[in-house]
Amino acid sequence: MTTMSNIAAMPRDVFVKRSDPVYMAHSYLTKVPLAAIEPFIRTFSQPGDVVVDPFAGSGMTGVAAAILGRRARLFDISVLGRHIGTNYLNIVEPGGLRTTAHAVVRAAVARAGDLYAVSCTRCGDEHAVLAKRTWSIVVECPSCGAGVNFYRSLESASWHKSKMVCPSCSCPISSKARRIGEEPVVDSIACGCSPTQLDQLPTGDPATLPIGELDWKDVAIPADRQMYQASALGKHGLTTVASFYSPRNLAMLAALRAAIATIGDQPTRDKLMFAFTAILTRASKRYQWSRERPLNAANANYYVAAVFYEWNVLELFERKIEAALRSDGWILQHYGREFPLSEFAPDVTYETTSAERLPLPDNSADYVFTDPPFGSNLFYADMALFQEAWLSDFTDHNLEAVIDRGTRKKRDGDRYQRILKAALAECRRVLRPGRFITMVFGNSTGAVWAIVQRAIDEAGLVIEPGSVAILNKGQRSVKGLASGFEHVATVDLILSMRERRQGDPINSHIPSAAEIEDSVAAALADGRVDSPSHLYLELLRRGIAEAWDLAGLDLRLVTQAVTKQGWLIEPATGRLKARGSVVLRGAPQTGGRPVAPDVAALELPWQEALPLASTPAH
């Protein structure tokens, strides 16, 4: 049984790295690392207990429960989430998977042709291999109407976007100009004449592509989807999943999927599809180019940058097979038992169903750990279309617990509150008396936090004040780096709740501007916070402890209070800095001396899994 001393021992700040082999094996939006889940499962449950996650996503709660000797019942409406979550625990024999994967690649090449064979302009070898191609958009000059290759214009401007001009009329050029085409600009190849990749001008594409002979579902991205509108897909003609791939990569992906479908052993076939869906975003045009190094794919939107990559699908697949095997090895290593691989059978199930109606008996679970969608931050079903198109099975986005953006909201805040309340009430129903629910949540607006407060209250629950922790996943997104300017929270709160008892406070106190400013000043003086996002969550934590109504507490107000009190927000990092100081290791500095960050942080840098391969995961 959980005691208050257990809760008091929990860290105030949970800092984890998003780099363990399980995390790296397959991407999924807002995935919580295992290192952030494990301490809560340890605190609130015992070996053999049943752990429930009604918003299971990629199934990380199930993995964490399994390696800690718990049982898990996972639920989500997401078809992609179920595919990923079940295959994390679908452990297969490494040698057999590698052999089958190689056979699948050979079959795909036999079907589609050797689409990545290129000629090396350095030595003339016609059997060099294309590792990746760099593409540039072509924009229309707003002055003379000429087509301008964005990459070449940027190159001519010595890589300064502010100096880009049309080569025909010298009119300034930017990526906001109308896109009228795409052109290849650089091929990166592997050839026996060089120990490292060579860059050369594109040498042409295969004469023919077997597009008409291969099958895939060219799934439309409907205009009513939020991410269609946010990414202006109609403007750029990117209205289907297939339109995000080069013809070469589309053909090879189709051939690869067809070859996987012929594998008779279902666990092996499912694991191959796990690796296949893991490469789909990187294999598309959504992988942004950078002069220094690749910036990675845009997983949270459908953005295609002005300069982007076309990666070799077969190399991506073979590397992701190794990443999947590293994940398997890590799970087996941390499962901590000696047994034949055929007997690895953790008691973890994953069902696609709404969190509002859990198919579990009353008082049948011991603990809930969950990570629901964060209001209007992300639209999981919209982004999952990219993988689900190839799985031929789709999430019903009408059931998604999100808040639509814009003025015409079919899914508004009231609906979101009803879904979250119903889900939490279901968690309360299935829990045994005296047990806890832990929820990860992040948002930068007080209005959404007030919705969460009301949903918790109406579900008959209360947040245990001493249990509120801040989750910092370490790496920041490109948008998150400028959180102080764009008012986007980059860290989350971990809230642990129990059934409401008589005498528990009601969230009714509306903090004054002076209280908020005082709270900001106290947090800054404490030296604990290193960014506006972190500071914002410190205020939310205080507000929860003191029963504030959080409706008016926005990240924007916090950043205004920060600058009013004489602090700066570094443009390059999004970190806080006292005027006249430097920033070192993320902590504010004054007079050359660091302010001691009195943080009870939990940092669990995972050791590398079993040395199955040396190829890095992506």
Image (spheres, rainbow, N blue to C red):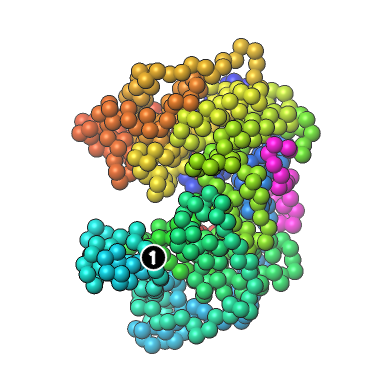
Q: x, y percentage for residue 366?
A: 71, 31
Residue 522 visible in this rendered orientation of the protein: no
Q: Nearer the viewer, residue 18 or 195?
A: 18
Res 256 quadrant in image:
bottom right
- Please give the range of residues in magenta: 335-358
Residue 85 picture location, percent across and down: 65, 50
Q: In percent of the image, x 55 and y 80: which residue is there? A: 209
Apparent side of residue 569 relative to residue 389 in the rendered image (left or right)? left
* Residue beneath the point at 50% across and 36% down: 442
- Residue visible at 30% across and 46% down? 572
Q: Could you say where residue 53 lies in the image, as x and y percent from the top left?
A: 66, 39
Compared to residue 280, the image places residue 591 above or below, namely above
Residue at position x 57%, y 74% from top? Answer: 251
The residue beneath circle 1 is: 179
Q: Quadrant of residue 44?
A: top right
Q: Name the residue at the right extreme.
A: 361
Question: Given the image, on which type of amino acid does mark 1 rest?
Answer: Arg
Q: Secondary structure at mark 1?
A: strand
Q: Main secondary structure of the magenta part?
A: loop
